Structures are given as C-alpha cells and as structure tokens.
Image (cartoon, rainbow, N blue to C red):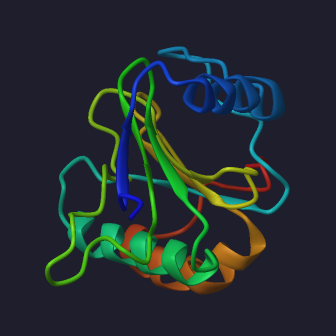
Amino acid sequence: METSVTRLSDEPDHRELWNRIHRDFHFRPHTAAFPGIAEPSDSITWRLPDTESGIDRLQALVESGLRTCTPPGEDLYWLDWQHEGFRFDPHRVGGVGQPSWPGGCFPDGDYFLYTSDDLRHGTFGHPWESTLCVYGADLLDRVAQPITEILGTAVRRGGKG
C-alpha cells in the first residue's frame, strides 16, 4: 500500500517540480523585490497579518479547498524553499487516524507552496512581502470569499495591484 505522505529532499520529482516553478512562475527569491513569482492570471493575493490570528481558519480553508479540487488518487505537494518538502494524498491526511496535513500556508521565514503536480492550483506564501497568493480558478471559486473575510481586501488580482 502506498503511503499517504512522502518526505522529499533530493528526489528527481522534487527537483523537477522546483525547476518548473522557477520556469513557469519565474520564481525570484528576494527580500525586497515583490512579488516573488509571476502571479497567474487566475490568482488573488492577500496581505497576511502580523500576528497568527485567524491562521488556523485560513489553513483549514486552504486544506478544504485543495482537497475538494484534487481528484482522489492525485497527489499534492507542499514545498518549503531550500528545505525538504512533501508529496501527499489530500484525501488521506488530516482526518481521524490519518497523518497530519503537511506544512502550512503561512510562511514562517521561507517561501511555502502548496501545488498540484501540473501547477494548475495551489498557494504561494511570500515571507518578506507577507502575502499569500492563491491560484487556480477551481480553488479560488471555493476559497476566495472566505479568505477575504479573514484577510481583508486583496492586494493583487492576476498579478496586478
């Protein structure tokens, strides 16, 4: 039986996914040049609060949205720039008797990403800009309104402010 969570370090699929993120999103890590990616046209970016108030609700929304948008049997990835990441089945984590949902959407000093393998939906947390970009029309349909209720007005839509 396949495991529901796999730790990734230097595996080929981990490196290849980061290569695609660099190429397709023009990922540019920097402490002052924002945004850190070329945000997709189907994206919304919100400013994150200075405190972790509401972050548990935000995390639960992201998890629920990603689980709903990801067909059974398809894996998601949680990536932490220059650190280990995880490949996981969102339908087999986070429930009673299941492993915990890997990672988080609130960046704690590094870039945090949730993404599908084909980059069609996910999140990009920028630690220095203190923003969360959610991309993919299917995911946005499920989470944009409740995230706005938690974080307030978006700072960018489709990469435009």
Callout count? 0
Q: Residue at x 36, y 22 (%)?
A: 83
Q: With respect to residue 2, does 119 lie above or below?
A: above
Q: Is residue 101 left or right of residue 46?
A: left
Image quadrant where residue 143 sits: bottom right
Taking the view exactly as shown, the residue that stands out farthest to the left is 97
Image quadrant where residue 109 sits: top left
Q: Residue at x 21, y 73 (%)?
A: 98
Q: Position of residue 45 (x, y in %)?
A: 60, 55
Q: Is residue 86 visible?
A: yes
Q: Position of residue 85 (x, y in %)?
A: 40, 35
Image quadrant where residue 122 sits: bottom right
Q: With respect to residue 86, does 155 lie above or below?
A: below
Q: Is residue 35 visible?
A: no
Quarter the N terminus occupies: bottom left
Query: Foreground residue, 91 or 82?
Result: 91
Query: Foreground residue, 137 or 8?
Result: 8
Q: Is residue 116 left or right of residue 89?
A: right
Query: Foreground residue, 90 or 59?
Result: 90
Q: Position of residue 126 (x, y in %)?
A: 47, 36
Query: Foreground residue, 88 or 120?
Result: 88
Q: With respect to residue 109, does 96 lie above or below?
A: below
Q: Residue at x 61, y 74 (%)?
A: 70
Q: Position of residue 24 (x, y in %)?
A: 82, 33
Taking the view exactly as shown, the residue that stands out farthest to the front is 1
Q: Is residue 54 left or right of residue 142?
A: left
